[in-house]
Image (cartoon, coloured by chain):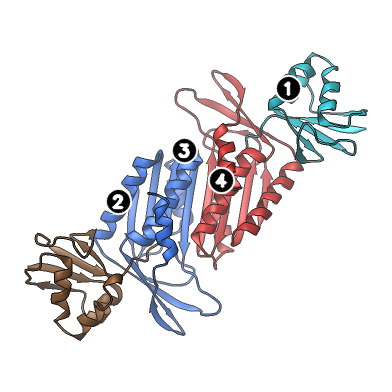
Chain colours: A cyan, B brown, C red, D blue
Amino acid sequence: MVKVLYFSWIRERIGHSMETIETDAKKVNDLIQELKTKGDGYNFAFSKPSVICVAIDQELGDMNSDISKANEIAFFPPMTGG
Amino acid sequence: MVKVLYFSWIRERIGHSMETIETDAKKVNDLIQELKTKGDGYNFAFSKPSVICVAIDQELGDMNSDISKANEIAFFPPMTGG
Amino acid sequence: MRVSIQQKPFSLTNELESFTAANTAAGAVVSFTGIVRSEPENPLEYMLIEHYPGMTEKTIIKFMEKAAARWNLKDYLIIHRFGKLNPGENIVLVVTSSKHRRDAFDAADYLMDYLKSRAPFWKKEVSEKGVGWVESKPSDEIALKRWK
Amino acid sequence: MRVSIQQKPFSLTNELESFTAANTAAGAVVSFTGIVRSEPENPLEYMLIEHYPGMTEKTIIKFMEKAAARWNLKDYLIIHRFGKLNPGENIVLVVTSSKHRRDAFDAADYLMDYLKSRAPFWKKEVSEKGVGWVESKPSDEIALKRWK
């Protein structure tokens, strides 16, 4: 069981900001492939992997990061703070 | 007739902050040589030419600047504002 | 040494007043204030700032620790707002103090560069012309390279 | 767009308050405040700042014009004091505002570097150990080279 969070336009495309899912994915990229099968919103949200950022347990990671021990995974576009 | 101003420790060594003098000096350096003949205070003030800054009519100059048309010449050590 | 991620507005002058009152020994204080802009050619109605609670604080504290290790700082303050902000409202405040101006300037500059593109905030602009998420700028990534 | 060379103390917060009130369209405001420091190992009694009236204003206005030509600034403010200053008192304030943070940061940084070593001010420190003129630092000359 892993908590998955979505922010900004990724959240809007998917339609919700958080869900808990059951997955055997070992890498971020595997999880994205799984999520894309969940519907059009997901497909649209993850259609351009180059603009997707990821945090694993609140630390920035990348598409190859290991998620087998993660509790919380977040997807979001490049940050625009400040 | 030219107005000569002194600041900081140059003023302290010379003993006054302003004077009006009659000079035929064409360059800053000539004027310094002339001033040095005016007494020990002047000699002491101008003993290290490398740390003397000069402004001619309120614009920074150097030892070779032309002063034949100057109205106001100021001598001071490196500035320490801010 | 304070970080505040808050919804409510803040006053630059009140914040600086308490900061400087606590920093009488510092020779140099630098502040950066980011304000919601509205362009005359496309007047902004308001801005919405979303963030990632938990990660935001963690990330900012990490930047601050890096800044404190790199520069000789006496104190620092970061305030960043989220939620709905109107044009003219303050978004962010970074204040640094140090014995020397170089350290205070560089640390504030560094913290702003990291807040811009490494702290989990996302800005959405609502104007007459429509609604859109602010895109990250390549110049912000280039700015970060200065600190490597 | 104000330059003030003054003997009387100023309040950072009051100055920033009027500055920001007049600059609601700027996205970024950077302030630098220089404060009289007192080192515990040699407590300062007071500082005396001498300047060259006339040339000071002229020189600072020239720096400001250069900054305005080089960066995209909305507004700027410089206050520099002279006379007798006690530890903890503000010496100098530089505030810049711009659409973008880079311009505001760089212009404030540039103005401070020029004020430090090209504006006709001289500082004298009076402490228990004695009285001495502050010497200019080679690092300040190096700092100026960044802007060539």
User: Can residue B31 be seen in the rendering of this structure?
Assistant: yes
Do the residues under discs 2 and 4 have CB atoms within 8 angstroms? no
B69 sits to left or right of D117: left
Q: Label 3: how many residues lie within 10 Å, few (<14), some (14-19) or many (20+)?
A: many
What residue is disc 1 on? A12
Can marks 2 and 4 be said to lie on one chain?
no
Judging from the image, mark 3 belongs to the subunit labelled D
Classify A69 as above or below B52.
above
Q: In this figure, which residue is indicated by the disc labeled 3?
A: D26
Q: Quadrant of the C terminus of chain A?
A: top right
Q: Kindly identify which chain the residue marked by label 2 belongs to.
A: D
**Residue ID for mark 4:** C146
At a point 55% along the width and 26% down the height, the residue shown is C45
Q: Nearer the viewer, mark 1 or mark 4?
A: 4
Q: Are marks 1 and 2 on the same chain?
A: no
The part of the image, by quadrant, that contains residue C120 is: top right
Q: Nearer the viewer, residue C71 or C81?
A: C71
The amino acid beneath tag 3 is Ala
Q: In screen coordinates, is A43 left or right of C77?
A: right
> Percent position (x, y) of residue D12?
47, 56
Q: Position of residue C44 (x, y in %)?
A: 53, 26
Q: Amino acid at mark 2?
A: Ile
How far separated are the C-alphas under marks 2 and 3? 22 Å
Q: Which residue is mark 2?
A: D61
**Residues beneath discs 3 and 1 located on the same chain:** no
Q: Nearer the viewer, residue D139 or C111?
A: D139
Residue C92 in sight from this viewpoint = no
- Helix, strand or loop at mark 1: helix
Amino acid tagged 1: Glu
Above/below status of C76 relative to C47: below
Point out the tag, 2 or 3, that comes first from the N-terminus: 3
